[in-house]
Image (cartoon, rainbow, N blue to C red):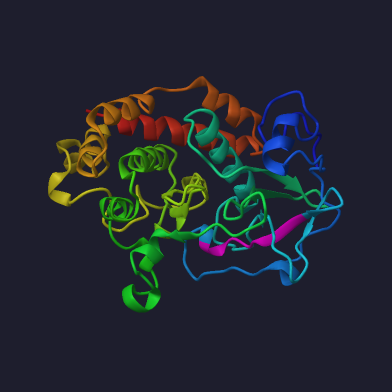
Amino acid sequence: MNKIEVCPGTLSPGFDKYSPACIKRLFDGINVSHILDFTYDENDFFFDSINHISISGVQEKMSAIIIDKKIQVTPQGSHGRYIIKPAPNYKYLRYRDQIPANEHLTMQIAKQVFKINTAENGIVFFKDGKPAYITKRFDYDKFGDKVPQEDFASLAGKTSKSHGENYKYSGSYEDAAKIIRDNVSAWRVEMSKFFSIVIFNYIFANGDAHLKNFSLQQSVDGDYILSPAYDLLNTSVHVDDGDFALQKGLIPSELYSEVYKNTTHPCKEDFITFGYRIGVVPKKVDAIVELFSKEYEMVYKLIDNSFLDDRCKRMYKRSYQERLQRFLRE
């Protein structure tokens, strides 16, 4: 493992371990080490695999908990408070060893640059130096009680039996927005958040933003709200996928712009149409589109500070530039 020069949580320079801000948010103030005292063995910890070409479907995951100020594998009978995702072993993914750093970086960009509410996350290192992504579960409250939560596939009543093995990729993002409208009392507020995440996923090339990667959860007041964003990843670094994960894209095909019809890629005009159709207040549509219409130096700083290798940093920067240009096309 190379020497750590940035916080493995916030990517802030000048730290050789987790920063105080990261310790507070990610580990509830418990001063844990970023180096685990065990190595990863897929035979011991592998518990989640879905036969699909997507990245999230082939990522191994393990449940973790903090015991005696150490991050440890969750003992049987206990509720894990963290999920650790090592680099997947699926050989058809390009640069698969870079996936933990990619997910961490993408989540940090969403949070720090675009102020998207995300699951708390960081990088940990196994005893042998291999990195993994760690994220704090948000479906348990501070008292350890389970928070009621359902993903969009469940809310839409879509299963492999009803919609085939690729059920979580069925429909459009307009269809997904209807789930918010049907299940959330203050739906306009949550719809603006959803709108932001959909644009973010496009500009940062997350081609795996399927129905199970969006959820509603119950707030302390008993209302349902959009859960923090999770599983954000620039998939273009690792697989050749399309603009959108959902098979029917953003909106009905006849409503796409001339730019889309000429290039087969959406631009901001298409997202504006999408925003209006799902009920985002027009002024809010304009503000969110404007937010994503700029090139941010902080994005490049976070990429440079990330745990990606130099080759993948270049690929990530190029992807951001290409997608932003595509978004701004008129």
At 59% from the left edge and 63% from the top edge, which residue is drawn?
Answer: 90
Q: Is residue 6 visible?
A: no
Does residue 157 appear left or right of residue 276 in this picture? right
Q: Is residue 5 above or below residue 151?
A: above
At 68% from the left edge and 26% from the top edge, which residue is drawn?
Answer: 12
Q: Is residue 322 rendered magenta in the image?
A: no
Q: Read off the magenta span.
A: 57-65
Q: Is residue 44 above or below residue 145?
A: below
Q: Is residue 283 above or below residue 164?
A: above
Snapshot quadrant of residue 105:
top right
Image x and y of residue 81, in percent: 68, 55
At 38% from the left edge and 68% from the top edge, which residue is drawn?
Answer: 166
- Looking at the image, the residue that sits furthest to the left is 254
Does residue 115 appear left or right of residue 85 in this picture? left
Image x and y of residue 59, in percent: 59, 60
Image quadrant where one finds the N terminus: top right
Does residue 89 appear left or right of residue 298 in this picture? right
Question: In the image shown, does 309 or 216 lie closer to the viewer?
Answer: 216
Q: Is residue 16 visible?
A: yes
Number of numbered discs visible in the structure rendering:
0
At 30% from the left edge and 58% from the top edge, which residue is drawn?
Answer: 247
Image x and y of residue 199, in percent: 36, 38
- Looking at the image, the residue that sits furthest to the bottom is 161
- Looking at the image, the residue that sits furthest to the front is 221
Image x and y of residue 11, in percent: 66, 31
Does residue 155 appear left or right of residue 67 in this picture? left
